[in-house]
Image (cartoon, rainbow, N blue to C red):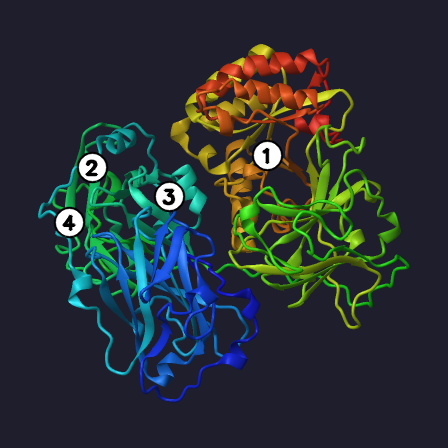
Amino acid sequence: MLFDRRLVAGLVGLWTASTASAAACTSDLLIDNFVKWTAGTNNLDWQNGDDGSMTSIAASAGQVVFTPKDGNSYFYESFPCVQAQSSGYTGINFSIQGPAGASVALELQTASSCDASSNYTSSYNIVSDLTGQRQVISLPLLGFDNSPNYDAVVGLVWSVFSKVGSQWSIGNVSLACGGTATVPPVTTVVTAVPSRTTIAVPTTILTTTATRSTTTPAQPTGCTNLLIDDWESQSRLTFLGYNALGQSSSDDGTMASIVVSGKRVMLTPTNLESYFYSQFGCLNTANKYGGISFRIRAARGTTFAVTLAWFDQCGSTNIKTFTQTTTQLKWTFDGTERLYWFPLSVFTGLDASKLDLVYFSNFNAAVILGPMSFYCGNTATEYVIPAVASSAPIPRQTSSTPVSNAKTFVIDAFANKDSNALGEWHGSDESNIVTQGNNFITIQTNDSDLSWNTQLTNKCADLRAYSGAYLHIAYSGSNKFSVALQQHNAKCNDAIAPFPETWDSLEAARYASATDIYMPINHFNVNLTRTIGFNLRGFYANEPTYFTKIEIVDKVPNGWVMPSKLPSGKLVFACTRPNSFAFAIDDGEPKYAARVMEMINQANIPVTFFTVGLPLLDEKNGLAKVYKDMAARGHQIALHSYTHPKMEGLPDEASIDWEYSNDLGAVKQVFGDTVHSNYFRPPFGTEGARMRQRLAANLKDPNAYLVQWSVDVEDWRWAQSTTPQKQLEAFKRDLAKGGNLVVMHYLYNSTINYIPEFIKLAKATGKTLMRVDQCMEDPNAPPLKAF
């Protein structure tokens, strides 16, 4: 789904008790006229709100008025499960006022039944072309995508506001009883798309395609749909800018937002100048593919234009285009998802043997696209997403859990804002994710990079006496997060790098019931003589979790089934070999690669390159050639994901496995059998139990290395600032703390200019510069030698 908004974790399990009757309705069901706003509820006494996602929000005169902050802003209404269809409800009514021409997505949240658990699924509709005045919207209940269960409706969420920073309002939300809900004419005003058969595709796009290398993907015997994009990965599309063909795909920043989820992409235009394209690379479709098909969901009255471009000769700069509007294609939309297609033959003059790109433009409203593909012959068919094999069952112990002799003690009961029950610090650097209550805290974030800590000590705590005991966490709500036990450095000194030295993370959901989490202390693979405290991290769903107690206990409840410990690799922040130092260089701009390699060659040092898989396969950027040369010179090639997402933030194990398997496949394709790596650097440094467990499983190595850093040049912060010299200051700072493992990128010219100085400073420490595997004393690493 596009937006995973948990309505109220505190209400988990109450749907059955609160289920509205399926008796025939006699009047509209008023959900909210905002008279109870100050009490924090709607008219049904269930929670509503924005969870702090808006810049400002207030209610008065029967409506809530707010200003969306960014593409992640939303407003929700929760209510007891309603058997809407059986009860005779036919639509959703509300008033709305937003900027003229703006659009917003409405998410309908439904359960499998009103007797089911709290899990829900999401379906969407789009309200577009707002007039700028307050207007009443009546959406047909049956007009949402994904075939929701209309007899288990549990919530509404407004999101993807096409114009942020402007004032919006919503009022008088209700379910309409009886009749046929329709969209009033005022909501379907269509902004006219210019009547023309050609649209000027930006020359920067066409110029880029004209110089690229071109290959036609090999096809199996017979013909199957040729996938252009299955919207598998947000990071592949919006971070790296590739489609499933490995060709460029982008909006060049013209869209208000692009959201990828559930094999769909939602394009929200800023204005009529917004566009989106996907390139083919001078693809020969002649006598094989007859057209392009994809599913589309858009509001009634939505229009846009489709342009195809082709070369006169592959590799030339002479490119021709032809445009068809959705009106010319006779496409109409009604808010439901349907299959649409166009034959290549309707694009006058098109040379199907040299196709360059498809270009969408002149959007008057947001649209959601499903997988896009070329279909075979003259009969339109859609691309079928391959079934994903389910993960192997989680191994579990069936024997009873032992009782420890350790004394039970409470670590945190959340009585104080800044300290726990031990009088030690607890808290987070990101205070906006935590709400302090009366003897509880609420954590809500889907940013897997954020975390919350509760310390055992500010030095080193010896937990060996508790190795047979259990960590107990009393909670409610979401269990989609990890729990880590942190290990201090050998000096127990937080002024020395690294701090912490490492930690091990366990997946909360594997050890959880609906109210309790029990984790054996000996499942945390750390040095128990040097523990610091526990860390709640790797949150991967925007659902609140309520924590009421964290403690060490000597036993678990009778009948508790404890899962086995899954291998989770080695998380390292520093070299272990005495007197060693390693430069570990991440992804960068291909245009700078050769220059960086020349600097390294001149310095005569071995380094480690953590490479992103997908750009390696892009023949036009030259990265594969550069990295193959560096591997031949003795440098280490290691893994850095396929498309560079926050791995722990991905929604499920299948998505995590997709990243690993494709990354390994890319390395295999480029380097053959000459490179095999069990070293992985998590993109953005984002770590959690699931991505660690799946790394070990995919590499078939329980001790696979997850490589972080103890020297950060902070190029992400300073390289494009007015003070780029702070990169050098950051390097010196971490060097002075004893850091010996570097993270840096070659994304920016200013960073590259400092590389010789970085190397000079590292050599001045007297340490030996080497590859990461060598500095980790890996027995499989090549021997140290003069470079």
> Considering only order in the chain, which callout, 3 or 2, is on the residue closer to the N terminus?
2
> Considering only order in the chain, which callout, 4 or 2, is on the residue closer to the N terminus?
2
Residue 241: which disc?
A: none
Kindly identify which residue carries mark 3.
243
Q: Quadrant of residue 515?
A: bottom right
- What distance separates the C-alpha of mark 3 from that of mark 4? 22 Å
Kindly identify which residue carries mark 4.
324
Between 531 and 591, the one nearer to me in the picture? 531
Of the two numbered discs 3 and 1 in the rendering, the one whose residue sits closer to the viewer: 3
Query: Crowding near pointer 1: few (<14 within 10 Å), some, many (20+)?
Result: few
Kindly identify which residue carries mark 2.
201
- What distance separates the C-alpha of mark 3 from that of mark 1? 27 Å
Kindly identify which residue carries mark 1.
673
- What distance separates the C-alpha of mark 2 from that of mark 3? 19 Å
> Which quadrant of the rendered structure holds the N terminus?
bottom left
Residue 53 pos. (x, y %): 44, 52
Can you see residue 787? no
Q: Which residue is at a point 47% across and 71% down the rendered structure image?
A: 46
